[in-house]
Amino acid sequence: MDARLHSAWLAGRIRHRRLRPVSHQFQYRTGLLALDLDDWPHIGGISRLFSVGRFNWLSLHRSDYLAPATPDLKQAVQDQVEAATGWRPDGRIELITHPRYLGYIFNPVSFYCCYAPEASPENGDLPRVVAAQITNTPWHERHVYCLEGAPQQNSRSGWHTQQYRFHKRFHVSPYNPMDQEYHWVFSARGPELRIHMNVRRDGNRVFDATLEVQRTPFNRKTVRNHIRRFPLETIKVAAGIYWHALRLKLKGAVFQPHPDKLDRQDPAYRLGHDDHGERVDDAVPGTGKVSSWRT
């Protein structure tokens, strides 16, 4: 790793399983960037294939992330987390995301992982707060769930785990209604990271997704290796969403209208549209707090 940088690549696999009312599943290899936000000013100088603020095979652009009106992304994350939790992050902040590939960007979710001053993601420490910014398609709306304070559970195999249970407040898939609950699990062991999401409705698990990745250093060589393995990752992600949406439609999945298009008498009408810090967890023992923010 370059002596100036703490950023890393994350490589592994992602799996989606839809269990009901229509069964459908897939998995594929994936690669993401774990960007230490202190590296933002320097990371574009590591490789001729990676730039900040200009077109390249891989590039970062401030407008693609949280609160783009604030020039400094780290300050924007600190402001968001302080508004949500009362704690202003004073340790490392790591953004798990896709950069642009040949100018194209789409991130279904980006995780801003805010660590205590003594914590380090390389050691398998878990963040004190996670701000998860979700973008839907084709609407390209953005929403943030701010997750904080889950107690850490340690397994004999060395995994550290935190859990969050909360109510859905943002329309993502056109085949998923709004009356659903989330159960998110973050687990780390050294350079390994797992993020698992269960979706439940009426007490039944209807969907789950799992991301399993391992950290590798960020340097000139690994930039080239990443492009060889994942040359068009954001394009692959967006195309895959529409391809699997078509397959679900052909299997008989029922389209769910956007909450803004529902009848005004529907309980889900504009649900989450005006959220500004609403508490959306159920305070289940062993889990953390979650607030909802439309951005």
Image: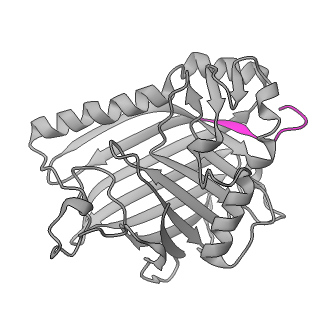
Bounds of the magenta span?
A: 1-10
The structure residue drawn at horizontal position 52% and vertical position 78%, both measured from the top left corner, is 286
Q: Residue furthest right?
A: 3
Left or right: 116, with 33 as reference point: right
Percent of width and height locating residue 207: 29, 54
Q: Is residue 106 magenta?
A: no
Percent of width and height locating residue 63: 60, 43
Main SS category, magenta section = loop
Nearer-the-camera pick, 43 or 8: 43
Left or right: 41, with 198 as reference point: right
Q: Is residue 201 above or below residue 62?
A: below
Q: Quadrant of residue 1?
A: top right
Q: Is residue 6 magenta?
A: yes
Q: Is residue 57 above or below residue 109?
A: above
Percent of width and height locating residue 180: 28, 67
Q: Quadrant of residue 102?
A: top right
The structure residue drawn at horizontal position 28% and vertical position 33%, both measured from the top left corner, is 242
Nearer-the-camera pick, 120 or 134: 134
The structure residue drawn at horizontal position 44% and vertical position 39%, both measured from the top left corner, is 14
